[in-house]
Image: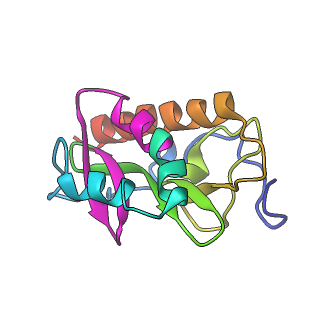
Amino acid sequence: MRNARAPPRHHQPNWQSGLVSKLLRFPSAVQRDPSVDAWLSKPDDELRRFAQPWFEQMRGCGSDVRELLHDGHPTACVGDAPFGYVNAFSAHVNVGFFYGAALDDRADLLEGTGKRMRHVKLRWAQQVNTAALSELIAAAYRDIRLRLRSAS
């Protein structure tokens, strides 16, 4: 369910109108980071394993996907530009998007009120709209590739 304060996101992304001038970059991103695998497979942390299939989808978006641990959680990038992350908390998992405010969220999954970032909160007892979340991951990947093309 959408955060009550966040307006629906069915508009042109801000970067298309020139409002986003610089992209966040993580030059230490690599094709496969062993620390990400260690994070995902930490013993006695079922929520991290709950997050793993979503991060695997991010990894599978394209051959240009790189990864790293940023702020202590797995982050997926195209080259060095991040597009998604997963994080596990005590009672839920976030599947987040660095430019999520620009994504078309027809299923109303995204939460957050920040200028750019949004996340989908997953809980054990709640059903996941897997098709819609998979589409958000794919859309975030396409979005960052377009941003990179526009920035060059």
Specify the quadrant of the image occupied by residue 5: bottom right
As drawn, which residue projects farthest toward the front? 44
Residue 41: x, y in percent? 36, 54
- Residue drawn at 60 percent across, 68 percent down: 114
Q: Does the magenta portion include 60?
A: yes
Residue 68: x, y in percent? 25, 56
- Residue drawn at 66 percent across, 64 percent down: 112
- Residue drawn at 69 percent across, 40 percent down: 105
Q: Could you say which is closer to the camera, residue 3 or residue 134?
A: 134
Specify whether residue 25 is in view: no
Does 64 sit left or right of 127 as displayed?
Answer: left
Specify whether residue 18 is in view: yes
Residue 39: x, y in percent? 34, 60
State which region is magenta. 54-77
Residue 113: x, y in percent? 67, 67
Number of marks drawn: 0
Q: Could you say which is closer to the camera, residue 17 or residue 44?
A: 44
**Please, is residue 50 above or below residue 64 in the view?**
below
Does 103 sit left or right of 42 as displayed?
Answer: right
**Please, is residue 36 above or below residue 132 in the view?**
below
Q: Does the magenta portion include 89?
A: no
Q: Could you say which is closer to the camera, residue 134 or residue 25?
A: 134
